Amino acid sequence: MNFPAEIQERFDRNELVAAIAQDATTGEVLMLAWMNQEALSLTLETQSVTYWSRSRNSLWVKGESSGHHQKLVSLSYDCDGDALLLKVQQTGAACHTGAQTCFHRELSS
């Protein structure tokens, strides 16, 4: 698959790209994960969001074991090509803790 030059440069250096999942309906930021070229290709092909797990060193389809799937609605990338914004339809909680979003712990207000 051909990706924009900014993103392809990251993949050519074997770098991961930050992937921010946002609820397509509410706009709530759900989580941050990582994608490599294969994860991005699979996500675009299947519309089921696939990430790269740095701890397991392998691909993982969001919701494969939990049932809390993410269906891709749209995908865009930032001006540097080092971050993706995935607008998704979230089924169930996005966070592995059971919270709707991974950003549920406030540091400052």
Image: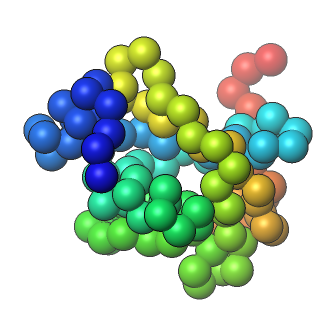
Q: Quadrant of residue 4?
A: top left
Q: Residue furthest left?
A: 13
- Could you tell me which residue is drawn at 48 percent across and 29 percent down? 77
Residue drawn at 36 percent across, 26 percent down: 81
Q: Position of residue 37 (x, y in %)?
A: 29, 52
Left or right, 11 with respect to 52, comes to left
x%, y% of residue 87? 68, 43
Q: Position of residue 106 (x, y in %)?
A: 74, 32
28 lies left or right of 7: right
For residue 30, side relative to residue 14 (left or right): right
Identity of the residue drawn at 79% across and 38% down: 28
Q: Residue furthest front?
A: 2
Above or below, comparing residue 59 to residue 3 in the picture = below
The C terminus lies in which quarter of the figure? top right
- The image shows residue 88, relative to residue 55, as above or below, that is above
**Is residue 102 visible to us here?**
no
- Residue shown at the point (42%, 39%) measured from the top left: 18
- In the image, 77: left or right of 93? left
Q: Is residue 32 above or below residue 56?
A: above
Counting the numbered discs, the total is 0
Query: Picture coordinates of residue 25 (x, y %)?
Result: 86, 43
Model colouring: rainbow
Quadrant hosting residue 92: bottom right
Q: Is residue 108 visible?
A: yes
Q: Residue furthest right?
A: 26
